[in-house]
Image (tube, grey):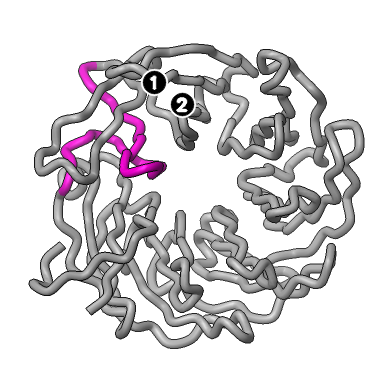
Amino acid sequence: MQKLIGYIGTYESPASPGIDCFSLDLETGRLSAPQRRFAVPDSKYLSLFDGVLAAPVRRDGRAGICLLDIDSPGDSPLGECLPEQSPACFVTQDERYVYTANYHEGNVLVYDKSGKTPRLARTISIAPGAGCHQILFTGDYMLVPCLLLDRVNIYDRSQNFAEAGAIPFEPGTGPRHGVFDRAGSRLFLVSELSNELFVYEWTDPTSVRLRGRTPILPQNFTSDPAPASAAIRLSADQRFLYVSTRFADVITVFALDGFQAAPIQQVGSGGVHPRDFVLTPDGNYLLAANRTQGGLACFRLDPESGKIGALCSSVPAPEAVSVVLAQDKRRNTTGAV
C-alpha cells in the first residue's frame, strides 16, 4: 500500500497545541486520523525541505523559527531562534536559509540554518502592519506581497536584498499569495480583499506586464464576513490553477492557456475556512485544510480535465492553517503513520 506522509500547521488552541502528522493512501484517497507529532505552539505555517520542517513558534512571550527533523523519533527541535514579538504567518526555506514574512510586524526575516542552531542573518523592514503575507522567488529576485499596502515589493538577493521595484495595486485589492510557472515568465497572484486572479508576464523587475485580471467569485457574491481568497496552487503540468476562498468556502479551478486563465469549476472546500490546500505530486488528489469546520478534506482530481471530483475522506484538524506533504512515497504495512 503506497502512502504519502503529511504535516498540518495550526493556530495555537487547546485542541491544537502543535504540528500534526497524517498519511494519505494513494490508492483510495483515505486519510489517517492526524496524530500530534511536534509540540510547537502557534506553528501555523510549515515549510518542508530535505527532511526538515521549518515552522513559526511562540514561547515565553517571544516568537521566531524552529527546525524539526521529521525522521527523528522525538519531538525536540533541532534548534530555535526567537527574535520576533509575534509569530510569522509564512515560512519558506532553501539549502541554507529560512525566510519568514510577518503580517503584523511588517518585515521579512532571513535565518541562516547552516549551523546547528538557526541564527538571524538579516531583517528587511517594510512597514508596521504592512500585511506581509508570502515570500516567493524567481532567479535572484524575492517578491513579498504586502496585503495591506496593496503592492508586491521586489528585492535583489544578489545585491544584499536591495530594493528592486514593486508591483502596485489599486487600494483595497490586498495581494496575498502568488506562484510562478517553472520558466519564471508567468506570475499568478491572488488578492484577498478584491478576490481576483492576476496574471503577469515577468521578465525582470523593470518589465512586469499585467496580462489578465479575473474575478474569482460570481458577480455580486456576498457573505458575512466578506469572502477572502487565500491560497493558490499550480498543477504539476502547469495547465490548471487552484484558488481557495474563505467565507465563501470554495475552491476555484482555472484552465490556463498562455496568459489566459478561464474559470472552469467552483466547488465547496469540504468544510469552513479553507486557509490552505495542496495537490499531491501525482496530480490525483487535492487536500484542503479547513480551519474551523470540516478539518482536512481529500478530494480526487481528474488530471486530464483538472476538475475536482468526489470527496474521498476527511478527518478532524482543529485550527488547521497549512498543510505540507513529504515528497517521498513510503511503504507502510502496518497502517500507522
> Where in the figure is residue 56, as x and y percent of width and height?
35, 31
Circle 1/circle 2 CB separation < 8 Å: yes
74 vs 334: above or below: above
- Quadrant for residue 82, please give it: top left
Q: Nearer the viewer, residue 127 or 310?
A: 310
- Quadrant for residue 147, please give it: top right
> Where in the figure is residue 330, as x and y percent of width and height?
25, 65
297 vs 99: above or below: below
**Gap in Å between the C-alphas at discs 1 and 2?**
6 Å
Q: Which residue is mark 1?
A: 114
| Magenta stretch holds residue 239 | no
32 vs 273: above or below: below
Residue at 32% across, 69% down: 294
Residues drawn in magenta: 37-60
Q: Which residue is mark 2?
A: 96
| Magenta stretch holds residue 59 | yes
Residue at 59% across, 57% down: 232
Task: Kindly identify the amino acid type of the residue bearing the numbered disc 2.
Answer: Arg
Q: Secondary structure at mark 1?
A: loop
